[in-house]
């Protein structure tokens, strides 16, 4: 009775694992959840105040589909201030989370059979939404030794006459990898003079540890073909407010608006009002979160190296995920896949991690370190005991 389109679609693996962890927790099992990508800080006080004020001021009506004008102007200023990006307000559309921005973009661009180049590991929803739209994901493989980075040559080789879009996140979910200015310039060169759209998902922009975040769309030669995606969820710890935004060529923004006008209308009016305060404040009001993530990253890396010696551990430069390669524990035990490994860690260690296969990583797991240092330590201890048992 259901459509083939929906039957063929997978449920988001991050949300599926989070659901499992939540159900076990509710049943009284002491689960430590490293599955969901969600900051654990609570919304900053100044944002809560702004949201309360929006309710008092009775911002209760539908907003324009593309979002409040004042908000789009604040986004335009933020892009200039933080990213050296020149997007006027009429090239910006606000959506119900960056997830909707990405879905809008994919639906707006793809005809059946069109190709989208996606470096692996990739964020879980990219590939399923591309397929949902009838498109074909063309995955570029990377390795942990190269810090999960694609080279310009790999990108060039992946292009065909069907390529419509290149889609990646920087910093990357799930690896935490960051592409820096020089690397992005090399990639930009590949697209210069083509009509391929490049979508840069920068939702972790404020959670950066090593080096400076650089926006691909600030490179002059390709400015007019870059779509930049961002949102409040991660940088401001308001995942449930559902506020994301996209900026790009006018015709693409208009197409996204048409889709959104039929699917959801404008995003939540209270969240939009509060978002103005967030964007005006910028990263300085939330740098305490970034500092805490850095401390946790370093702790998790050294704990994993010390206690889970056969894991190959990467060093993320941003976001709040580790993406270790657990190949040894799959090849040398009864476990047949990384899905089985994640299931084993959930039942035996009572730690929820997301299988890397959901992100295009065959033997990795994704560990979100958006939890306290104490829980991080407890989680690694439990994983170590469970894996030792398995190897005996
Ligand atoms: N892009 C990436 C890379 C993400 O990790 C997420 C996860 N939240 C999103 C987009 C979507 O974010 P949201 O819909 O909460 O704005
Ligand atoms: N982006 C988060 C994650 O990767 C939230 C889950 C989701 O939206 O799928 O865990």
Image (spheres, helix red, strand yellow):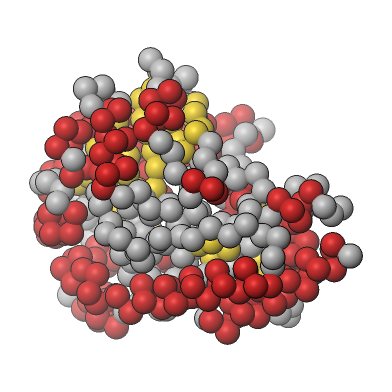
* Quarter of the image where the N terminus is located: top right
Q: Is residue 59 above or below residue 355?
A: below
- Image location (x, y in percent) of residue 275: 24, 66
- Tell me the residue at 27%/44% (across/down): 182
User: Which residue is most to the top?
Assistant: 161
Residue 386 picture quarter: bottom right
The residue closer to the viewer here, 325 or 225, is: 325
Residue 283 picture quarter: bottom left
The residue closer to the viewer here, 275 or 34, is: 34
- Tell me the residue at 47%/19% (across/down): 113
- Tell me the residue at 12%/54% (across/down): 80
User: Which residue is most to the right?
Assistant: 392
Q: Is residue 137 above or below residue 356?
A: above
Residue 49 picture quarter: bottom left
Q: Is residue 187 left or right of residue 29?
A: left
Q: Is residue 70 left or right of residue 46?
A: left
Q: Is residue 201 left or right of residue 274?
A: right
* Quarter of the image where the C terminus is located: bottom right
- Tell me the residue at 40%/28% (across/down): 153
- Image location (x, y in percent) of residue 29: 74, 77
- Image location (x, y in percent) of residue 23: 68, 69
Q: Is residue 263 left or right of residue 339?
A: left
Count of marks, rendered view: 0
- Image location (x, y in percent) of residue 114: 43, 22
Residue 26 visible: no
Q: Is residue 159 above or below residue 368?
A: above
Residue 102 visible: yes
């Amino acid at each position: 009775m259901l459509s083939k389109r929906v039957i063929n679609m997978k449920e988001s693996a991050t949300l599926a694992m989070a659901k499992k962890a939540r159900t076990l927790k509710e049943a009284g099992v002491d689960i430590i959840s490293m599955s969901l990508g969600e900051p654990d800080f609570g919304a900053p006080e100044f944002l809560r105040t702004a949201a309360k004020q929006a309710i008092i001021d009775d911002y209760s009506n539908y907003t324009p589909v593309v979002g409040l004008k004042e908000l789009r102007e604040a986004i335009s200023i933020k892009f200039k201030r933080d990213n050296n990006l020149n997007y006027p307000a009429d090239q910006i559309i606000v959506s119900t989370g960056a997830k909707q921005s990405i879905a809008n973009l994919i639906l707006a661009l793809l005809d059946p059979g069109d190709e989208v180049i996606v470096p692996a590991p990739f964020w879980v929803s990219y590939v399923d939404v591309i397929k949902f739209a009838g498109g074909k994901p063309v995955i570029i493989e990377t390795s942990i030794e190269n810090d999960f980075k694609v080279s310009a040559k790999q990108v060039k080789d992946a292009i065909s006459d069907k390529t419509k879009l290149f889609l990646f996140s920087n910093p990357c979910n799930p690896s935490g990898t960051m592409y820096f200015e020089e690397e992005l310039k090399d990639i930009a060169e590949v697209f210069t003079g083509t009509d391929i759209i490049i979508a840069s998902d920068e939702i972790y922009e404020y959670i950066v540890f090593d080096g400076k975040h650089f926006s691909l769309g600030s490179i002059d030669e390709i400015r007019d073909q870059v779509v930049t995606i961002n949102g409040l969820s991660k940088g401001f710890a308001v995942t449930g407010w559902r506020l994301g935004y996209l900026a790009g060529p006018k015709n693409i923004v208009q197409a996204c608006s048409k889709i959104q006008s039929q699917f959801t209308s404008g995003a939540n009016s209270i969240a939009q009002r509060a978002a103005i305060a967030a964007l005006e404040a910028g990263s300085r009001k939330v740098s305490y979160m970034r500092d805490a993530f850095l401390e946790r990253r370093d702790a998790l890396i050294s704990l994993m190296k010390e206690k889970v010696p056969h894991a190959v551990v990467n060093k993320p430069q941003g976001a709040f995920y580790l993406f270790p390669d657990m190949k040894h524990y799959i090849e040398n035990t009864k476990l047949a896949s990384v899905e089985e490994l994640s299931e084993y860690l959930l039942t035996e260690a009572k730690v929820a991690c997301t299988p890397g296969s959901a992100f295009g990583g065959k033997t990795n797991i994704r560990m979100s370190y958006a939890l306290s240092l104490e829980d991080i330590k407890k989680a690694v201890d439990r994983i170590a005991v469970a894996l030792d048992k398995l190897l005996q």
